[in-house]
Image (cartoon, grey):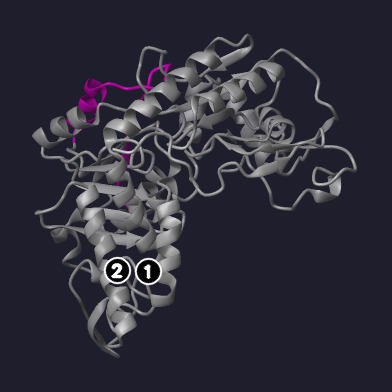
Amino acid sequence: MTTMPVRLIGDGLTVPCLDGLGRPYLSLDSAASTAALPSVSRRVTEFLPWYSSVHRGAGYKSQMATAAYEEAREAAVRFARRTGTDDVAIICRNTTEAINHLAYRLGLGPDEVVVTTVVEHHANLLPWARHGGTRRYVECDVSGRFTVDDVMGALDTAPTPRLLAITGATNVTGWLPPIDDIIEMAHARGVPVLVDAAQLAAHRPMPRSADYLAWSGHKMYAPFGAGVLIGPRATFAEGDPFLAGGGAVDLVDLDEVVWTDPPEREEAGSPNVIGAVALGTAITELEAIGWEAIIAHEAELAARLREGLAAIDGVRLLGPPLDVATLAVAAFTVAETPHALVAARLSAEFGIGVRHGCFCAHPYLIRLLDLPPDEVERYRHDVLAGDRTRIPGAVRASAGISVTPAEIDRFLDAVTVIAQGDPPPVPYLQDQDTGDYWPTGDEAPWSTGDRSLGSSCARG
């Protein structure tokens, strides 16, 4: 078991601040994306000279590349705790693509129901609207949680659902639904379960009994563009694959195609071999660190983060009560200060990177913020008119295995400065198109001219 914390590529990187001083960059945005583990970076560097086409090259490099790719697939099956089953691992780009892939392959009819929840990331909401079927939602309470009984009620409503699609951990508050109990209850009703494990994968073991799992390497210290969909081979053994192209076939004529067997059937085109190798290495590294060490370290960070924010005057902590265990994730607002301005000040004045906005979970944020319908409609009107200056949202700080308790304290000190009303060193201007704030002045790299186009943080 590895001693925590584990440093990542880029940790300690110095970034400039408005006072002219450089500060070690503190990334508290791991819920969005993580930096690479050093072992992942080394493995990619070692593999690059051996990179070649996979599955259809006779050369030695192709054989080596194919072996590395398939080792990564085996690692994903092992990480999902599916070794010895007939489940397959389909390597794709990310969780979003994985869930879209499954939604297409299930071939839902217009009268078939998918039960999901209002706490989901858009990746586990929008695909079910696009690929047929009817959605039925589990609501949450004011703290952003639901119970097993709430899910049971949705599953017991006729007609019986074709699938339950549910998060393993929310990306907004870090809350962990009682996923094992929920899966057991769904299975007792004959309903298979997809777990969106994007936020779970780097922090907790995968739920062994889930029928389908989807997760991304970029949230688990392998930011090279690979994700995974795990599911029973039978789901993918018949019918057309999600993507059509080379590598997915045994025979093609101008009027006929014979698809190959899964998982290759589902991976048309040249795959992201480097991303797969990176993902497989991250899996091996997390297994070596051990869940006991990871969970204990992040529990300390979560308590320090959430209790610290709750103790700051003017800060409203969203989500579960403090006595409920969560990941090291906290969403909050600061009284009288727009969420976009809080995030901008943390970056420009303190060298701290956080996320702000709705975190690709708009329905959930609306409920956590307890926004009335007329206010939501006003925001909708503004956005349709191209004005994003008043988009509702919050600030989110999220920590992973490389963050220390002292760095959490550094963040809390910075939030305290902002919350107590200390004025910024320079005025900030808000961009109407993006809703983001930028400090005014002529000093690089925070001058008005240094602002890059398309740098919106709040969209999603």
Residue 68 tag number: 2
> Residue 90, position in %: x, y?
27, 61
Upstream in sequence: badge 2 or badge 1:
2
Foreground residue among 62 and 145: 62
Badge 2 amino acid: Ala
Residue at image coords 44%, 28%: 328
The amino acid type of the residue labelled 1 equals: Val
Would you say 167 lies left or right of 449 here? Answer: left
Identify the element where label 2 is drawn: helix
Q: In this view, does 204 lie above or below 450?
A: above
Check if mark 2's residue and mark 1's residue have beta carbons within 8 Å: yes
Q: How far apart are marks 2 and 1 (CA)?
A: 8 Å
In the image, farthest residue toward the bottom: 254
Q: Residue, x 29% and y 51% (percent of image)?
A: 284
Quarter in which the N terminus is drawn: top left
Residue 69, how many percent across, how many down?
30, 68
- The magenta region covers 132-158
Mark closer to the observer (2, 1): 2
Q: Which residue is drawn at 86% across and 37% down?
A: 440
Q: Quadrant of the C terminus?
A: top right
- Placement of 91 over or under 350, stated as above or below: below
**Residue 384 placement (x, y as % from top left):** 66, 42
* Residue 153 included in the magenta stretch of the image: yes
Find residue 96 and report its horizontal and vertical position in percent. Answer: 40, 51
Q: Is residue 431 above or below residue 127?
A: above
Picture quadrant where residue 12 is located:
top right
Which of 72/292 is in front?
A: 292
Under circle 1, the secondary element is helix
Residue linked to disc 1: 273
Q: Is residue 375 magenta?
A: no
Q: Residue at x 51, y 34 (%)?
A: 362
Please indicate whether residue 410 sits to the left or right of residue 118 in the image: right
